[in-house]
Image (tube, rainbow, N blue to C red):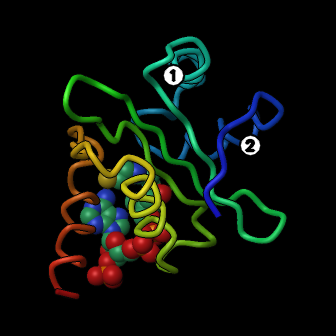
Amino acid sequence: MLVRYKKSCEKIAMGLLSFMPEERELKKLKETMNIYQTNSNWHLFLWKEGEAFVGLVGIELAEGHYTLQHISVNPSFHGEGIGHAMVEKVQQLIPDLEMHGTAFTEAFLEKCSEAKLAVI
Ligand SMILES: CC(C)(COP(=O)(O)OP(=O)(O)OC[C@H]1O[C@@H](n2cnc3c(N)ncnc32)[C@H](O)[C@@H]1OP(=O)(O)O)[C@@H](O)C(=O)NCCC(=O)NCCS
């Protein structure tokens, strides 16, 4: 289940975010969390499996599109479809805008588009 990030989950979110290679340094991690907490165009969501938060997805809204800035899943839950499910849920939340990737998220986003095309 996709839920909106709350300040009370800050440490959990930082832990999940740190699985992204470019977010491993604490300084960078804190800067990124600060952007999500202060910039109204940046939105962070967590993925809940039962009572546990196991995934994170962060987007930046822009003019005419939005960017998948961050996506990560706890390694114990890799390969279970959570990454795909998070992308799909976010796309359902913002159906009128196209999701773009960054240098870090583009590859997985491509993978998700391929999976969608395979279903059609
Ligand atoms: C990327 C990530 C979120 C995927 O989460 P997940 O829940 O394991 O993904 P799913 O189970 O929905 O999908 C698994 C598929 O995605 C593929 N995949 C995983 N990471 C990928 C990447 N960086 N680029 C392209 N495909 C990727 C897997 O090989 C697998 O492919 P298969 O179905 O053909 O075997 C997870 O691997 C992760 O947290 N990675 C570390 C953080 C990171 O690097 N994030 C940015 C990635 S672009």
Where residue 24 sits in the image (x, y, percent)? 51, 34
- Quadrant of ligand 1 in image: bottom left
Q: Nearer the viewer, residue 74 or 115?
A: 115
What amino acid is labelled 2 in the image?
A: Ile
Report helix, strand or loop for mark 1.
Answer: helix
Name the image quarter holding the N terminus.
Answer: bottom right
How far apart are the two marked residues, 2 and 1, measured between alpha carbons? 14 Å
What amino acid is labelled 1 in the image?
A: Thr
Q: Nearer the viewer, residue 72 or 62?
A: 62
Quadrant in which residue 5 is drawn: top right
Of all residues, the one furthest to the front in this rendering is 96
Residue 108 lies, with reference to residue 58, above or below; the image says: below
Label 2 or label 1, whichever comes before in sequence order = 2
Q: Is residue 16 left or right of residue 59?
A: right
Report helix, strand or loop for mark 2.
Answer: helix
Of all residues, the one furthest to the top in this rendering is 38
Checking the image for residue 32, the label placed there is: 1
Residue at (41, 58) in percent of width and height: 92
Checking the image for residue 12, the label placed there is: 2
Q: Residues within 10 Å of mark 1 (few under 14, many from 20)?
A: some
Where residue 87 sits in the image (x, y, percent)? 40, 59
Checking the image for residue 20, the label placed there is: none
Residue at (47, 39) in percent of width and height: 58
Where residue 35 sits in the image (x, y, percent)? 51, 16
Residue at (46, 60) in percent of width and height: 89
Q: Is residue 25 left or right of residue 116?
A: right
Where residue 106 sits in the image (x, y, percent)? 21, 49
Quadrant in which residue 73 is drawn: bottom right
State whether label 2 is within 8 Å of ligand 1. Answer: no
Residue at (50, 17) in percent of width and height: 40
